Amino acid sequence: MWAVVIIGLPLLAALLSAVVGWRRWMPWIGVGADASVLMVGFVVALRDVHHAPISWAAGTLRLDSLSAFMVIVIGTVSVLAAWGSVRFLDHDVRSGGSTTRHALQYSVLIQLFVATMLLAVCAANIGILWVAIEATTITTTFLVGHRRTRNALEASWKYIVICSVGIALAFLGTVVLYLAAEHAGGTSLHALDWTWLTAHAHALDPSIVRMAFGLLVLGYGAKVGLVPLHSWLPDAHSQAPAPVSALMSGVLLSVALYAILRFKVIAVASVGGAYPRAVLVAMALASLVLASLLLVTQHDLKRALAYSSTEHMGLMALAAAAGGPLALTGLLLHMLGHGLAKSVLFLSAGELVISDGTTSISDAGGLMSRQPSLGGVVGLGLAALLGFPPFSLFISEVTMVRGEVAAHLAWAAIISLVALAIAFAALATHGRRLLFDAKVPGGASARTPVSVMAPLVTGLALCGFIGLSAWPLGPILRAAARVVTS
Amino acid sequence: MATLSPWVVGSGLLQVALFVVGAPLLLGLMRTVRCRMEGRIGPPIRQPWRDLRKLFAKGRTQPERSTFFFASAPVVLVATTVVVVWLAPLLSTRVSLAGGSDLFAIVFLLLLGSVALSLAALDTGTAFGGMGSSRLMTIVALAEPALLVAILALAASVRSSSLSTIIVGTLHHPIWLATPQRLLSFAAFVVVVLAESGRLPVDNPATHLELTMIHEALILEYSGPDLALVMLGEQVRLTFMLGLLANLFFPWGVSLSAAGLSLIVGVLALAAKVAVLGIAISAGEVAMAKLRLFRVPELLAGAFMLSILAVLSALVIA
Amino acid sequence: MKSTSLPAALLALSSGLVLLCAAVALWRRTAKGIVGALRVQGFALAVTALILGVQLHIALLLVTAGLLVLVKAILIPVLLRRIVRLDPTGGETDPVVNVPASLVAAVLLTLVAFVATRPLVDVVPGVPITLAPFGFATVLIGFFVLVARRKAVSQMVGLLLVDNGIGLVALLLTTGVPLLVELGGTLDVLLVVVVLRVLATRMHAELGDLDLGALQELHD
């Protein structure tokens, strides 16, 4: 029942928006729906710590501790993004950037997008998971192309073609896994069920599971933004409107990684730890190194943030490869912290577009003197992203490295730290230029409205809070990590 | 096993005689069909024989600086074609030479004839000769492998490269005709036949413009008996390839023992099948246009791909 | 199913036709020809499902066959027709990889598919499984079309080839996945085609033609 409520709330918001038509207060419907989702997620997660998973609809939807935690992550980031959409849509409609029809389409699609992500994490079987993730691609394509410029068109075309290729590979992997399950005695929908698969994983034929896992990691890895099917990410995340980029970078990538985490459990039980680990380590390190190196040469803030997302996904994939309770707890905390920090930064970039008309780092330089409050937020957000305490990314990164060392992946952890250092230097330089190197020195400083600052400060505060305090997430994280520890 | 029974030897000679006499008649038939479909009456069916007779009565000419390549090519062409006709299982599956109906031997003999003609064209020292020679080699380079691999796909199911074994095997297992490798191989074979014999869409046999054609540029310098031999050789080749196509893919009527009644049945069946195929090709030509020359490699590459797919299917499904 | 029986031969024929259509999509130059190959492939897929359903007495597969005809052989080519008509040059006049080279590449990819699916074929017995390489080869050829062709229609067809190849593999390997997943998969493919169609129409309105080589501004 809870699962239906969780998925139903954003769907209801979308329906309501479509019925009501465009009003100035309409985006607040979405904010309300997402906040409710967050609260329900918390309630379920706290319950789940002591109870067993809740399932519904003849076993097609299930909420266990990991799903509940993912619901919290999705809820948090979507509240921030929906909050930011209020300002974005208001300005967009008023300045004539989009018609009211486009604004309505945006609002409906965003809530549908959130609903499909929630469906993916509440899915009880791998078929529903696949359908949900394919649905996220379809709903986001038009969101990426919202601005109807040539570059946005190119970005959305590339996005849907590459992600559809990845999803097709994931479907093939799902079919091959189903074959293995059928061979081990599963029937129809049962053979696609997570619990059944995890319980019977040792009985699945290893060579078939090997092929299936490779295809699944390649396919869903495309949605995570891992090498080799990663080239859509910088384009899509830089051309999309800021709240959409926040949602995609902050949480869609993590949802795809969640899928890979679940599959890894099955693969490890069937073929042993070495092969899944090797595949994930290879993709993680390649993504990390590539993203860090490319981060150095960026001129555009949003594109730099997109590469930073790829880099963080590589970090998380490395922790996923390590397995073990320590690395996985760090991974899950990192999902939430990265989601918060990234969405704050993308929303600030959106505000930059509104006030300065550009996100080019050199053109928008000297932000600190022009809009001190916005500059302060960007500075703190970058600090959070770079892993400074007290923000939670510090703790999560340290925990992930400790987990990797404990799992005999110290060499990979060292490579990741080197890549992180390069990315640190690159982002810090970009940040310094953005905040302090004014193109035209000596301009007047303007005030950023409180309504704009509110979501940004909230996000930063939350990020700092979860970095400092083990409550209330501590037991939730532990229970969630236990689900995917193999 | 060496079989020199008089029936087998006789059937081999009968094969050669039939093809040499019948090839120009087949060409006449094809021309008549095309003419009738285009609304004309056209020449009588034995017109190609009348042309050959006229040419044999004329004198020879030879370009000044040409060597024995030019002089010998017509003879080599006819000789290789006659040997191929003698060796192939056209009337019966018992062949005069033991192991003679080997796929590789037949394809390489055909290639030898093409190469001889091409060298002769180069030998003339004219621009047209060089042009025709290079065009022929482009086509042959793609078509011969396609032919080889296409028949190899058929050979995979009987595990032998002898054409007789393939035909006998197909007679015993008619179900093989419904397999993908047969159909793919058939498609590739048809394209190769059209390419090798210079029919549409590769080359237009009805015109005589050497600038746009392949065949005409090659034989530009030949006249008299040489030209007659070259024409006869090419006609026998066309008939031979149609006969091979008929027997490999629709083998009913082929004599298994090369004796008496079955031999007569074999002659009639072969004649009927070759005539039907010839008429079909002619009728199809009326509806087709010639491909531009740079598109021809695309067509032949496609045929090669079809034949490789046929082999892969044969390996998977066998 | 005996490997020398008529149903097995027919199954081999229809699976082979699926692969052949993929190769023909590489061969043809006109947009209409490429979409026509896709349509025939849809029918071939449906026939495969039909043969499997009749032979193994699984009613679900007959429903799947009907679904395949409706969506892949009829609906999707109709949706693509608009994009075919929009293209001013009428096809691939300047592909990234020329046609003979593409065909040789298709042959190599088929070989790779046959070799790579050896372990699968060895582990699981049964006639349908031996035909799985045809499906994998179609997937690889679909990827190649995505990379080697410039026009919007060709990229859409490449994506659909990948989907059809996976559909064939699913049919042969597992004699059909549960209906829910099949429906979800087909609906998703349909939606992707609709989305791509809208994007292609926008592209035509913006750029005047459907050449994706003109959309190369975003890169590092």
Image (cartoon, coloured by chain):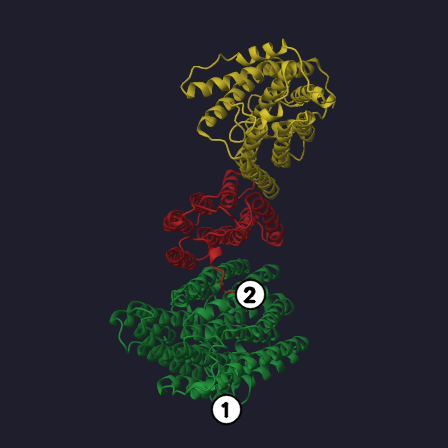
Chain colours: A green, B yellow, C red
The outermost residue toward the left is A20
What residue type is disc 2 on?
Val
C-alpha separation, residue under disc 1 versus residue under disc 2? 34 Å
As drawn, B54 above or below A288: above
Per the image, the residue denoted by label 1 is A469
Asked which secondary structure carries label 2, the reply is: helix
As drawn, B90 above or below B154: above
What residue type is disc 1 on?
Ser
- Viewer-closest of C9 and C144: C144
As drawn, A367 above or below B308: below
Q: Is residue A102 left or right of residue A313?
A: left
Q: Quadrant of residue A68?
A: bottom left
Q: State the mark number for residue A217.
A: 2
- Viewer-closest of B132 and A259: B132
Task: Name the quadrant of the C terminus of chain A.
Answer: bottom right
Please name the residue shown 37% across and 84% down the image.
Answer: A452
Name the spot of residue B21 as percent of width and height, x first: 60, 13
